[in-house]
Image (spheres, coloured by chain):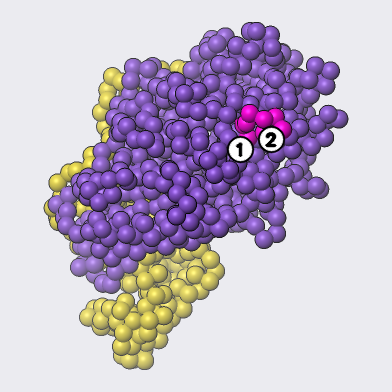
Amino acid sequence: MKEQIYINKTSEVYDAIVIGSGISGGWAAKEFCERGHKTLMIERGGVVEHRKDYIGENTPMWNQEHRGKVENILVDQQHNIQKQCYAFGNTTKHFFGNDRDLPYTTKPGTEFTWIRGNMLGGKSLLWHRQCYRLGEYDFNANKLDGYGNDWPIRSKDIEKWYSHVEIHAGISGSKENLPNLPDSEFLPPFEMTTPEKDIQARFAKLYPERPMIMGRTAHLTQPTKLHVEQGRVKCQARNECHAGCSFGAYFSTQSSTLPAAAKTGNLHIAPNSVVHSLIYDEATNRVKGVRVIDNNDLSEREYFAKVIFVCASTIGSTQILMNSVSKKFPNGIANSSGVLGHYLMDHNYNSRASGDLEGYEDEYYSGRRPSGIMIPNFYYKPDPKRGFLRGYALGGKAYREGWDAQQHQDGLGVEYKNKLKQAGKWRFELYAQGEMLPRFENQMRLHPTLKDKWGIPQIEFDVRFSENEKQMMEDATEQSINMLKAAGLKNVSGHAKHGPPGLAIHELGTARMGRDPKTSVLNGFNQSHDIPNLFVTDGASFCSSAVQNPSLTFMALTARAVDYAVRELAAKRI
Amino acid sequence: MRNKQTSTHEQTIGMGRQEKSRRRFLKNVTTMFGGAAIGSILSGNAISVAMAYVPSADSTLTDGKVFNSAQLRLLKQICAIVIPKTDTLGAAEVDTHGFIDNQLFHCHSKVEQEQTIELLSLINQIAEQSLSAIFLKLNAEQQFQLLTELDLGEKRFVQTQRKAFKKLKQLICFGYYTSEVGATQELRYDPVPGGFKGSIPYKSSDPTWATRGLFD
């Protein structure tokens, strides 16, 4: 393959343009390319090559600048927002956006944290890799209580696409046959520790309706032939994933979808190309291409295609649509419904509880498991007595304290040093992962005057958790404390803190799917109701947040939408 | 630093090199799946180490970035008392005091820097008040006794001073257990565990794992 994959200027009319190279964009590109379609993937940031550019990987603490922490001045000037992400540090900071270049505002009295991963691969390099299908209860939730609109799809519409993406990506987990959480196509699950197994057994007796399972995660616990062919091998349990993984042991664009797309010879990538807006042709009612501002020298260029997939992340995709104005669409392209930018959601991680586990002094573990345990949402059936709508899952893990937890104790000298050398007591913790209701008033909009350095209007957020989410976190704290006590843990404590949305980095909604073009932006195939050759397949398309980590659903929706688009193209309907 | 190019990466790099390197990687990993092979694959992949703090043989000879040399000598002795030399080197021997000076300057606030200086002054002040000598002139038993009282916030000290000392202990522990000696000799360091085992035997003489992963 002699052809250059990275391009800058071109007059080629592609079969498909995919805006974004993260989880959704990578899947869109792979599926188009494998169907023989010439595809241009547009990425606003620079190139990150698999392995070669994982510059923070496998660096011992003592060889890192400031032992993994980031210099004050750098944080103050460039990363004041991004530093709030748990994964931000010396070995990952180059994968996070520079806040100075990426300004946004929040409506006075509201807060929203917008974490950015603007480089080839996007947040597929930085994600937490937990993978759960949405199930029938999730797709029915809006319809049952009237918040948000009804999802236009059900499990039967998406099941085979979940399987399709899971087999390629590699998802570890255990078959459970639960009514509230469908199984995936699984590689073996990560092991539980002995205390986790015991707690699992105790919960099974005490709370039979709240089974505890191993977290499902996009890690190769036992690679298949397909994965080995992708150049990927078994997870080494380093748990340093966010720095990049040369083993390709977790799913990312670089490890999985990009090599598959590139192999076809149908892929071009335009890096450093910040999409300003879509080019709309009113005569044919089609999008023809995209206007791009160069990330570095700010020059303008255009790219053209027959079909456009917007996969630029929830906020990024909707920002592009909103900034694409024409006589027919003065309030943003594909926005005849007026709901574009509304129903913004995130997940709510504002409850934690933990306790001490007695015993197990002769038990330990080896390796750093990149996943924890999960208790799927046990409030999946509505119940007015509960006092709030929807529910939450509980994540958690058991671990033995190391020097970092034990350092706080009193003592000095040889005795202190010897204590810190030993593994400490066992702890078990739970945290909630709560659903956020879709509400019209939670929204993003273009700022009327402020622009970024590319001349694109800044986003103003107006989002808050409601009383429903707060009550849910109070309940989660109470339930978690009760469960830990019942399971025999000591010194149990927990709290709900009610921090603002954004930091779950599960932004969803703002260009929702739906059956009715008057109340939704996209149809059941992620296709614009207004413009047939325009698709949005990332989190922007969600009707509800459910409680599950959403990325697996981005993959399945995207693969399904490409399959549909290709058939529609062949039938000359788009 | 080689990563400088990442953000402004040339747009014209073909897949050739990546493809070649991918094949080599695949071959290495699938044919020689052992710790040594894994180590050699990853060794070419490091972030620049030039910016890491390099322990000095004696960082008390000159003024540091936050502390003067007298304060560094006092801090060195505190490091030696909190984490002494046993069958492995202690915090003072691996220049934890020099590391703390550098770390406070780059990654902590001015307020935290000043609080640490104040704590050092307090230790000398209490030593002089009660024993008529600065801390470094006290005998080993007196030094240990004084820091023990400070650690507990008792007798010659109060609870707010105890909190300040706990913060200093955190810096000492962080500096020591993330040093090469602390991580690899005092504790067990395993950069590439090869997988996760949920249950392995443990006896109290086994050191704990040095790394808990970057994010947990």
Residue A553 image position (x, y, % from top left): 50, 31
Q: Residues within 10 Å of mark 2 (few under 14, many from 20)?
A: some
Drawing shade for chain A: purple
Which residue matches tag 2? A519
The numbered dot on residue A197 is: none
Asked whether B171 or A480 is in front, the reply is: A480
Residue A177 image position (x, y, % from top left): 32, 32
Q: Amino acid at mark 1?
A: Asn
- The N terminus of chain A, quarter of image: top right
Residue A566 image position (x, y, % from top left): 60, 13
- Residue at (76, 47) in percent of width and height: A447
Measured along the vertical axis of the image, is residue B58 above or below residue A451? below
| Chain label for disc 2 | A
The secondary structure that most of the magenta stretch takes on is loop
Asked whether A96 or A429 is in front, the reply is: A429
The numbered dot on residue A149 is: 1
Mark 1 and mark 2 lie on one chain; the one further toward the N terminus is: 1
Q: Which residues are magenta?
A: A512-520
- Residue at (47, 27) in percent of width and height: A155
Can I make out residue A16 in this image? yes
